[in-house]
Image (cartoon, coloured by chain):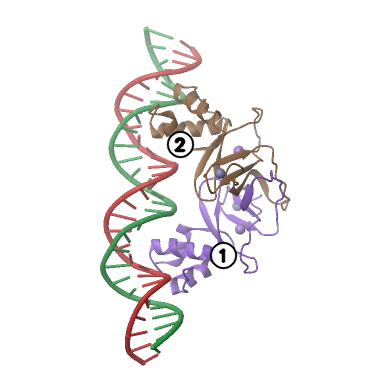
Chain colours: A brown, B purple, C red, D green
Amino acid sequence: MKNTRNTVAKSAILEIIQSSKVALSHVEIQKLSEGLCDRVTIYRILDRLMIEDVIHKIATPDGTVKYAACHHKHEEHHIHNHVHFSCEKCHSVTCLDTVKPSYSIPKDYLVKEINFTLSGICKDCNE
Amino acid sequence: MKNTRNTVAKSAILEIIQSSKVALSHVEIQKLSEGLCDRVTIYRILDRLMIEDVIHKIATPDGTVKYAACHHKHEEHHIHNHVHFSCEKCHSVTCLDTVKPSYSIPKDYLVKEINFTLSGICKDCNE
DNA sequence: TCTTAAAATGCAACAATGTTGCGTTTTTAT
DNA sequence: ATAAAAACGCAACATTGTTGCATTTTAAGA
Ligand SMILES: [Mn+2]
Ligand SMILES: [Mn+2]
Ligand SMILES: [Zn+2]
Ligand SMILES: [Zn+2]
């Protein structure tokens, strides 16, 4: 396996993601990093961070893609089985790490990842 | 409300979606319709069909967007609370209409839509 | 059936997002 | 210090979805 290096840009971007309360899109990360590195480099860093399992990707129903830090113990082969909430008012996407969904699926399916996103009004926008 | 019309293209596209076992992407629909209408028109038709609640949109974790027919009684204000399965081998996305997930979420969130997608190996690709 | 307004369409142009190739720079191990 | 691998910047490209506008089609009423 190709080993991955910790560069200045990579550390900075990880820090940005980890210190954010909400999941961030590529463009948001780019703005927050203020010319730290090229647009393409951000994409490549995000890829590496996902391979290392320190961040995860969230595809919201409206098509936008966001990234959030992983809040689990750093272990291999884990599943992000928590709920995400996407607010249609403030467009924030949050990890609800404590909420774990349950389901039962025919056993001829092999489940490797779950992606569970609820949309609506978040607690801050709710009246 | 702006009323919507049933055109040749719209009926054809709905038929394509309804007769497919798996959810279809915009490009797949375009290929299956073989020059029926413009690319843009397909997007607009998909929008109308979603407003009419005869199809629904599925955003898979890998970023691709697919469309599937709704298999519920034609009622207003329904929620598509069923599970989708996205196969990482054959890239098919299927509605598992019978599998209903359960979850509990803090009551200061107002849930309007749910999008639950499992990824892995589908029953056809599973050995 | 004829008339007419609204809805739908085609086309071109644009925008957003993500990817690839390649030459250069930086990191890490020897 | 040297060398190989990894990361980077930049430009170019690809894919996906959107918008404006002139033209055509649809559906409903006279
Ligand atoms: Mn999360
Ligand atoms: Mn479905
Ligand atoms: Zn909100
Ligand atoms: Zn499969």
- Please name the amino acid that badge 2 sits on: Glu
Name the subunit of mark 2.
A
Circle 1 is placed at which residue position?
B53
Work out whether A57 lies above or below B9.
Answer: above
> Looking at the image, in which quadrant does ligand 2 appear?
bottom right
Relative side of B104 to B59, left or right: right
The image quarter containing residue B8 is bottom left
How crowded pointer 1 is (Cα within 10 Å; few <14, some 14-19, many 20+) is rated as some
The residue at label 2 has a CB less than 8 Å from ligand 3: no
- Please name the amino acid that badge 1 sits on: Asp
Residue A10 image position (x, y, % from top left): 48, 26
> Residue D5 or D16: which is nearer the viewer?
D16
How crowded pointer 2 is (Cα within 10 Å; few <14, some 14-19, many 20+) is rated as few
Check chain identity for marks 2 and 1: say if they share one.
no
Q: How far apart are marks 2 and 1 (CA)?
A: 33 Å
The image quarter containing residue B40 is bottom left
In this orientation, does residue B121 appear?
no
At x 63%, y 68%, the residue is B75
Residue B1 image position (x, y, % from top left): 49, 68
Residue A78 image position (x, y, % from top left): 66, 35
Relative side of A84 to B12, left or right: right
Relative side of C8 to B22, left or right: left
> Residue C2 or B64: which is nearer the viewer?
C2
Per the rendering, the mark at residue A28 is: 2
The image quarter containing residue B55 is bottom right
In this orientation, does residue B58 appear?
yes
Relative side of A92 to A102, left or right: left
Q: Is mark 2 on a helix, strand or loop?
A: helix
